[in-house]
Structure formats: C-alpha cells, structure tokens
Image: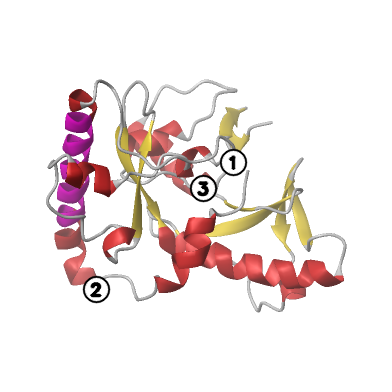
Amino acid sequence: MKRLTLFVILFSFLLSGCMYPQSELAKNQAALDEQVDKIQQAVLAYREQTGGLVPIHTKPSDVDIYEKYIIDFTKLKEAQLISEIPGSAFENGGYFQYVLITPEDDPRVKLIDLRISEKLREIYFKLDIYRQQHVYPPFGEKIADNVFTINYEKLGMKEEPTVTSPYSNQELPILLTTGGDLIVDYRVDLQLALEQFQPDVKEGEDIRFVLEDNYHFVPAYSLPYTIEDEKIVFQE
C-alpha cells in the first residue's frame, strides 16, 4: 500500500472544520445523495458519448485501488454533462474526493473522506521525524503478520490515534504496517455491515465490497480483509 497521493498531501491543509450539527445531518445526507447520483448519471452519459471512456485523471499503476480513479470534473463540464462541481467535492471546497470503482465493467461513483487523509498526513509527519532518529517505525502490539498498533507515546502523542468513520461515525484505529504505511482499521464497520446487510461472503475473499456496495464511501487507506473461522481478519 502506497502512502497518500501527492495531490492529497499538498492540499489537505485546506481541509478543516467541524462535523455538521446534528440537526442538519438528514438535510446534508440528502444533498450528498443527490450530488453523488448526479455525478453517477454524468459519468454514465460520458461513457456512452465517448464509446466506453470514463472521465478520470490518469494515475500511476501502483496507486492504491481506491485512489486510482479520481473523477475529472473538467471533462464532465466540457462535455456539458454538469454545469458545476458538487459542493461536497474537494475541488469545490468540500470534504470529499469523488472517485470511480470498477471503471471498466461497471463504473460506480464513490467518495473518499479527506478528513481521514488529513489525520494520516499529520501522523506521517510525526513518523518522518521519528524515523530520522530511529531505524524502525514505533511498532506496538502485533495485530497480524504485517500489521501493528502504533506506539503513539514514542511519537509524542497522548492517546491512540484514530479517525472518525464515514460509515458508523465511530472512532477507528490507525495501524502501522511493517513497510511503514499507515492504514485505517475498518473491522468495526465491516462487522456492522455484515450484520445489517447479510451479504454472501466466502472465506478467503476480500470482503471490503460490503462497504463499497452499500455506502457512498470507499474504505480508503486500508488493507484487504476476509472471513476466517467466522471472524474478520486481515487477508494474508
């Protein structure tokens, strides 16, 4: 898994502010639903107009799958399929990066919550300082063969680093891989989704599709998960 894209790192300092007040959540959710649906229809229309192309920025092949297909709103505007960029989009001052998943077969518009990107960027900064003085990252408890908690005290932090889930609004742990990459642990969200939606999942397959299929958001900055002995584990 690669570190945050340069695009996000350079511009994430613009992302600040509080969560929406509780009284406005339903209103904002409806607006977000409408904006995502509008871009979904525009993407499908663009694909039809161009004989199968999708409006995305070109990214290197080794970019994480959820960051690989960033929607290019300029192409949609030039094709006169949208008149303006959604207010929720990063390009228009919003919190979210609009992306595509499965673009070849069934292009679906999804979102990355860039407030997560901002939190990871902050911790990467602390990690870089730490690694200038130490050979290895500050590994904590082993979670899987290549995944550990962060010894946050060594980074000068007072508590375990977390990010707010775009799915459940719960605080999700930030973990560290043996390669020095930060990942978000979505096991809580996956468990809730499995219980709610009762999808057909098989041992050994990546089950992140459960989140992709049922929510606007993709589980960005994550590793694959699977089911083993009826438990959610990191995929080997």
Q: Earlier in the sequence, mark 1 or mark 3?
A: 3
> Spatial distance from mark 2 to mark 3, Cα to Cα?
24 Å
Q: Are marks 2 and 1 in contact (CB under 8 Å)?
A: no
- Using the image, determine if residue 170 lies above or below residue 60: below
- Residue 93: x and y in percent read 29, 67
Q: Earlier in the sequence, mark 2 or mark 3?
A: 2
Residue 16 sits inside the magenta stretch: no
What scheme was used to colour the molecule? Answer: secondary structure
Dot 3 lies on which element? loop
Res. 173 image quadrant: bottom right
Q: Which residue is mark 2?
A: 21
- Local packing at callout 1 (Cα closer than 10 Å; few below 14, some 14-19, many 20+) is some
Type of amino acid at the residue the image marks with label 2:
Pro
Q: Which residue is mark 1?
A: 223
Closest to the observer, 47 or 116: 47
Type of amino acid at the residue the image marks with label 3:
Tyr
- Residue 168: x and y in percent read 38, 54
> Spatial distance from mark 1 to mark 3, Cα to Cα?
9 Å
Front tag of 2 and 1:
1
Res. 88 image quadrant: bottom left
> Spatial distance from mark 2 to mark 1, Cα to Cα?
32 Å
- Residue 219: x and y in percent read 46, 45
Type of amino acid at the residue the image marks with label 1:
Leu
Residue found at x 68% / y 72%: 126
Q: Quadrant of the C terminus?
A: top right
The segment highlighted magenta reads 30-46
Closest to the observer, 130 or 21: 130
- Residue 75: x and y in percent read 25, 42
Camera sees residue 140:
yes
Q: Which residue is mark 3?
A: 186
Image side of residue 120 versus residue 38, left or right = right
